[in-house]
Each structure stands twice: as C-alpha cells, then as structure tokens.
Amino acid sequence: MKRLLPLVFGVVLALSAQAADATRFHTVSLLKYALRPLASYGPEQALSCVPRGPQEFGGVPFNLEAKLEFYGHAHGQDDRFHNTRVTGIPIGKQTARLHLLHGCNYAEAEGRPVATLTLHYAGGDTRVIQVQYGVHTRDWFMHPSEARTNLTDSHSAVAWYGDSFESIRIGSKHRLYQTGFELPLTDKILQSVDLYSAFNRASFCVFGLTTEDADKDTKPADDGTNFLRTDNDTRRSLMVRVLDEKGAEIASPQVAALALITKTSALKLGRFKPTAGGEVPVDFPARSQGVRLMVTAPGFAPKLVTPEAGSSGELAAKVTVKLTPGTEIGGSVRDENGKPVAHAKIEIFGARKDESGSTLRYLCEEVVTGRDGKWKSLAVATNFEGLYFAVTQPEFRPARFDQETETMGGIKTAALRTKLAEFSIQHLGKLAGTVKSAEGKPIAKAQVILAATWKESTKDQRKEAVTSTDASGRFSFNEVVNGKLHLLTRADGYGSRLLQLTKEDAAQPVEIILNTGRVIELELTSGEKPDDTTLAHLRFENSPDASFQESATISEKGVAIWTNAPTSAIDAWFDGPEKRSETRRIAAGLAPVKLQMKINNSLALPGRALNVPPGIRFQ
C-alpha cells in the first residue's frame, strides 16, 4: 500500500475487548502543564498525526489534549530542553490502576529508566514507579532498522500506529504505547502524581493519563517488588533562592544549569524557572559529581554559582544567591530600508565555557522594541563578553547577532555600551506560484511542500511548510527563510516533482508542471518472507538531506508498485530491521520500470537507522 501525503492515519490496537466504563475510569487533563496543545501542530509537523480529544484504547478512555515531554540529554546537547518535572497532578481518588499513553523521543539502552512517577497518598505515603525503555516504552518512531520491537512488561503494548509527513519521508511509522500500572495502597486516597525525568538519552513523552477506581474487591499490587520509596537512583534536586543586595526577593529569576558527570563531560540541563513561592527548583542526574548554575534576573548582572558538597558528599538542598545591578546596554532594530521596527523581541543570551569543555548558555533578559525601534537592558555584567542576540518579529525573518570577539567581527561592544548597536532584519518573503498539467490545465488540491535548509552557528537547521493549491492551481507560502529552498509537489494522477529554487526564483511566481506519473514495480527476490517491517523506497536524485522519499509496504509476494511514480531520476531500495538492499538508480523517463532487487544483510548496521536524517524528532 502506498502512503500518500498529506493524509495521516492511525490504527488503534485493541488491547482487550472490554468497553470503557465511564463510572470507574477518569481522564486527567494535561493541558495546563504543556507548552502547547496538540491542536496547534500543523500538517508539516509529526505531532499532527496524533489522535486528539476523547479516544479509547484497549477499553480505556483517554483525553488527548497535549504532550508532556521530559528532559533527555540527546535533545539537551542540541539545546532542545524539556521539563525535568511536572508536579502536583491532582487525582483525589482510591486508585487501582494508572493508565498512561506514551512514547519516547530517541532510543535508549534496554531496561534503562526514562522517567519516574511519584505517587502521593493521603497520610504522607509515597511510592515511585520507574518507566523503563524496552520494558514499558520505546521510540515513537518505529524505524525499519530497529533491532527490538517487543516490550517485556505484560501490562504494556502498542496502542496506536500512524503516519505523518515526517515518518513517511524517512520510511518509518509512528506508534504510541499504553501501560496500565497496577498500584499498591488501593485502600488510600491517591492525592496527586508527579512525573520526573530520569536524565538519560531518551526524552519521555506522555499524551494521556487516566485513573481507574479501586473498590472493595480490588487486589493491590505487590508493594515490595515493584515500587521504590524515592527516585534517588535517578534524580537529585536543589532549590535556589535569589535575592538583591539588600536581601529582598528578586522577581522572575532564572537558573541555567550544567551537570558535571565526569571531569571531562557535562550535560546541559536548560533553564529553570521559579515556582509560585519564588524559589527555583533545579533537578539534575543522581550520577552528577557537581553542578554549575548561572543565575539571571531582569535588571541584574548574571552570576555563576558552584554549590559546594557537604561532609556527606551531597550538595546542599538549598542555595541562596545575591545579585547586583547590571550594566546598561541598548540599541535599535531596523528593517532593510533603515526604518525602525516596533514590537521586535530581543532575547539577550550569554555563554560560559566550563572546564569540562561544555558551554553553559543562559538567557540574560528578553526586551521588546518601542515604536522608535529602540531597546535597552540592564541585565549584563560590567565586563560583558560572549553575548548574542536573537531578534524575532512576526513580519520579519528571525535573525541572530553576536558580540564581537578578538578573532571574529560582530556587534561592537562600544556600540552596545552607548546604546547605538543596530540590528537590521528583513521582511518575510512570499513564495507563490501555480501547479499545472503538461497540457496547461490548473491542478487543484495538489500538495506543495516547502523545505528550507541552512546553517546557524555551525549547526544544520531545517524548516518545512505544507500547503495545497486552490481551484485555479494557485499556492503561496507567507514565510520563507534563508538557505536552500526545495519544493516538492504531489497530486493524484501525476508524478511528484522536486524543484530546487534560488532566492531569485523565490522572488517571482513559480510555475510547476506535473506530468502523468509512470509505473514503477520493485520486486524483492531474496527468498525471505516479507513482513510489515520491510519497506520499499523511492527518493529523488536531488533530494536534500536524504529526505523527500516515498515509501510503500510490499505484498506477500515481495512486490511494491507505484502507479504514479516520479518521472525524474530517482533512487530505489528495500530495507527492514537489520537488512537493506543495494540502491538502484532509475533514469528519468515516462516508460514503466520493473526492477528485481536482493536484500543484503551485510549492509545492515544494527541499532542504527540507515536512512534517517539527523535531528528529525518531535517539534
């Protein structure tokens, strides 16, 4: 079966035939704890394929409103930080089971914890459950090269499969897992639940939480073998209190943290914000040898703090930091014509390299330009250095500006001190065009995908957008970023086409001509019995970053057929868990193509996704 875009679909797997009983199940809303609702994700983003609203999996109801994602150091090392904790989720009932709908971002070692759940009972009792990779959960991307797909916990299973633009492009599927945790102390009120990161590689994600009532016949789970009393094996924490020179509480402090794992390695933990009480909780891995804290607040100079360990070897549970007023800097934001830009947000960042070689990045302050385009800040140190400025405004392209150094130019320090630093940003471009057939007829409902790739601070960046043509075959994108631009166009009855555009091309209307597609048939002749994990792939010759590929499952006879395949030059191959065929080039043309290909297991790299571009995960 060929997978087409933008259609995304899912398969719900019934874990039991039992219908949901509304009287004993209670869905818990996670929306207030999340950064954004699931409904806010567009079709170009992987999370758009996740079911939303009231759903039922295996006889258990869930309300899918948002995703909670917890810190994993694979994302953290790329400066993509998630919560280390979500606390105080209210329950207030005698509870027999806690049902989670979940998955991971990135793979993890088998059996390694990815998160913990802390259960708070009436009377002060607490119990801790470890969520473990390969036991309860796995990567929500199911890659063909995945060595293991099973779970060892009998109460955990795949609840849903689905596809998104992203998964189809890289030849994988999405999946979500469901676990029913049987609880102890069923005779007591479960007051609340906390979730914490376990500070390993994978980021744990929760999409739904449902409780199941206990009654007089409920048999509690064995309290001695499955439940811990603390999560000290995975997490430590400390509280930071931030004061001014006179000892008064400072409003809106933040703490950027770095966990020292060894003398030569560290984990970036991101930024921590204060609780309602004003103190800043900082969580870090239990295996840490120490932490570095950069404490900031609007109007105050940043301060680097290294908490000391006591006689027991443990860091102090509370740290008090006093900040001094910062130095004033400022400037203005203007457009490409020199006119002032109002309402531009400027995030002022600092960076400090640790002795381990890791860089601790921290936010000094966020400021907004006035009608005259001017801004100022008092949140940098007297001898500030290594600053950079992220400038955003909805009608302009995002931009970054770095303070000058001895070896590299940039915004001059003197200009910042005299409030004369000038940031120039460009209006967003508008890419528009039409899609037509070879006969010149407009093609309605064609899907047009725009991908932009560029480098930012030596890192590869990528952004995508998806739209469809109207009845006249017209399309437009209101946001175009710098970099290499590629347009992929698909329409029923036509072969897909991939175009690479220059800035000059994007500045004027683009006309895209689609030809009737050709038939391409790939046959697997290795003698192996095909299964659902073996896929056939086509990829455009000039595709950027190994993306824009079309994938298909194969028949019981080992055949995959595209009836409207691209007429341009493409590459074709088969792959699956720990196996892959050779890649064959198919020349451009209109004539049907039939190829026979063999799987060569020696080409496989166990544990590694062979055709997955780096960095493609949740957005």
Image (spheres, rainbow, N blue to C red):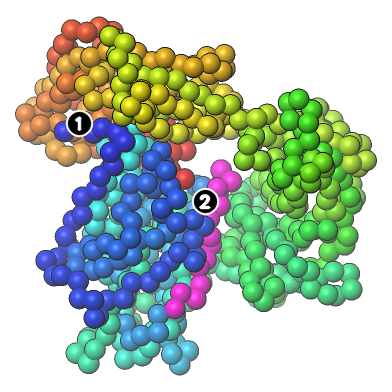
346 to the left or right of 159: right
Q: Nearer the viewer, residue 516 or 242?
A: 516
Residue extent of the magenta highlight: 76-90
577 to the left or right of 235: left
Q: x and y percent of residue 141 in the render? A: 33, 45
Mark identifier at residue 73: 2
Name the residue rendered at 66%, 45% in the picture: 358
Q: x and y percent of residue 85 in the render? A: 52, 66
Where on the picture, by quarter, is residue 443?
top left
Name the residue rendered at 40%, 84% in the picture: 92
Describe the element under mark 1 as helix, strand or loop.
Answer: loop
Name the residue rendered at 15%, 23% in the picture: 561
| CA gap, disc 2 and disc 1 | 36 Å
242 to the left or right of 184: right
Residue 163 against residue 36 in the figure, above or below: above
Q: Which residue is mark 1?
A: 2
Can residue 30 be seen here? The reply is: yes
Q: x and y percent of residue 476 in the render? A: 46, 27
Q: x and y percent of residue 316 in the render? A: 69, 73
| Image quarter of the N terminus | top left
